[in-house]
Amino acid sequence: MTEAPATEAAPQLAQPIASEAPAEDAVTEDAPKPRRRRTRAHNDPREKRKQAQQDTYSE
C-alpha cells in the first residue's frame, strides 16, 4: 500500500522540476538584456571599455 502512493508522487514531483530546469535556461538565453553576458574576462580592459560604453548608452 505504501509503494503505490510513493510511486505516484515521484513522477508528479519529477515533472515540475524537469519543466523548471529548461524553463530557466530558456529565460537566461532569451533574456531581454543580452549585453549582460560576459564573453571576455571581467578584468579585460576591452570588457571594461565595452561595459562603460553600454552603461553610458543605457543612461
Image: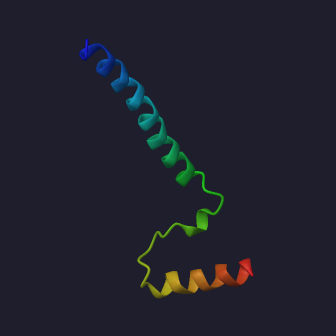
Residue 53 placement (x, y as % from top left) = 65, 83
Residue 20 placement (x, y as % from top left) = 48, 41
Is 46 left, or right, of 55 in this rendering?
Answer: left
Q: Residue at x 41, y 77 (%)?
A: 41
Residue 31, quarter of the rendered image: bottom right
Residue 26 placement (x, y as % from top left) = 54, 46
Q: Nearer the viewer, residue 4 or 36?
A: 4
**Considering only vertical position in the picture, is 52 above or below 22?**
below
Is 13 left, or right, of 26 in this rendering?
Answer: left
Residue 16 placement (x, y as % from top left) = 46, 34
Q: Which residue lies furthest to the front in this view?
A: 1
Q: Which residue is drawn at 61% across and 85% down?
A: 52
Count of number-bearing discs: 0
Residue 33, quarter of the rendered image: bottom right
Q: Nearer the viewer, residue 4 or 30?
A: 4
Which quarter shows the C terminus?
Answer: bottom right
**Considering only vertical position in the picture, is 18 above or below 29?**
above
